[in-house]
Image (cartoon, helix red, strand yellow):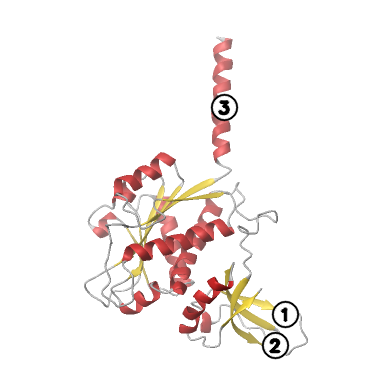
Amino acid sequence: MRNLFVAFCSFLVLSMGGVLAQKNQIVVMIDPGHGGKDVGHETSMSGHEDEKHLNLKIAKFLGGYIEKYLSNVKVMYTRSTDATVSLDSRVDMANNAKVDYFLSIHCNGNDNRNVRGTESHVHSMSAKKSVSLARMIEKQFSSRAGRHSRGVKDKNDLQHSLQVLKFTEMTSVLVECGFITNRREANYLNSTYGQEIIASAIFRAFRAFITKEHPNISFKKTAGSSASNSGSGTYAIQIASSKEWIDDEDARWKKLDVKRIKLNTTSAYKYIYIVGNYATRSEAKAALEGIRQKGFRDAFVTKR
């Protein structure tokens, strides 16, 4: 009897050790919707891309932000190229890998070209964690990214189930990033700037959610992180400078993720306001046009 009890205790300790080890890191699977032969919503606008391409670009920006700015988070993708991946395969990938979170990235479409806005879908409103994450994403879209949020929806709103939400076994959210059938929103989704802002909003919500959900895991990058993953990019885009302090939540740039920096200078201009964090000048230049289209015609790339 004693040997059996010792054996049971040993098994329990090993089992608990495995659970504790898993808590040192979380895994998120990012699912760029459609791909390959499955185009998703097709565009009729010249110079614009179909949904499958936009989904992949936004997904990669999102994964990039997670890898740059967070520690102890492993990023996986259901596809990283323009490949055809079945819904069954996407579900199996997530379940077999036992990931903690599943984020499916999509763009919407509607016969009514006036319809616009973001949506975050969960399978059921009873899935409390999924609903919480979805609400945080929509809050970021509306409050920080300046998008029109259509809210959180489930199978009852759609009147049908979404396979990647119904059959995945973890906290899962499908994000509709906007309507490619609405010209203004399509222009935004087809810009590098728009893709970055959308991805940044999802990232911020995800970071806030996992920080609350996993208080025993440190997601903050340490000083010892490698340069390629530290998130301390070399270039940014300067949109303004000022003599006096201006709130970086100012209405003039409420749709931008602006960082205010106080300069150590004898110049009259004591503050600069920058956007973005880019590893190379070419990446910053690619985003610059989108910033200028927002009305900041004098914006320029600066080395940090």
Circle 2: residue type: Tyr
Rate crowding at label 3 as few (under 14), some (14 to 19) or many (20 or more) other CA atoms within 10 Å.
Answer: few
In primary-sequence order, the first of circles 2 and 3 is 3
Q: Are marks 1 and 2 in contact (CB under 8 Å)?
A: yes
Residue 169 can be seen, yes or no: no
246 lies above or below 25: below
Residue 248 in the image, given as x and y percentages of width and height: 59, 78
* Residue extending farthest bottom: 268
In primary-sequence order, the first of circles 1 and 3 is 3
User: Label 2's element?
Assistant: loop
Q: Which quarter shows the N terminus?
A: top right
Q: Is residue 291 left or right of residue 227?
A: left
Residue under pointer 1: 263
User: Label 1's element?
Assistant: loop
Residue 97 in the image, given as x and y percentages of width and height: 43, 41
* Residue extending farthest right: 266
Residue under pointer 3: 14
Circle 1: residue type: Leu
Q: Which quarter shows the C terminus?
A: bottom right
Q: Give the Cα distance between marks 1 and 3.
A: 54 Å
Residue 13 can be seen, yes or no: yes
Rate crowding at label 2 as few (under 14), some (14 to 19) or many (20 or more) other CA atoms within 10 Å.
Answer: some
**2 or 3: mark nearer the eye:** 2
Circle 3: residue type: Leu
Residue 81 in the image, given as x and y percentages of width and height: 39, 56
In primary-sequence order, the first of circles 1 and 2 is 1
Q: Is residue 15 left or right of residue 225?
A: left
Q: Residue at x 51, y 56 (%)?
A: 209
Residue under pointer 2: 269
93 lies above or below 2: below
Q: Residue at x 58, y 21 (%)?
A: 10
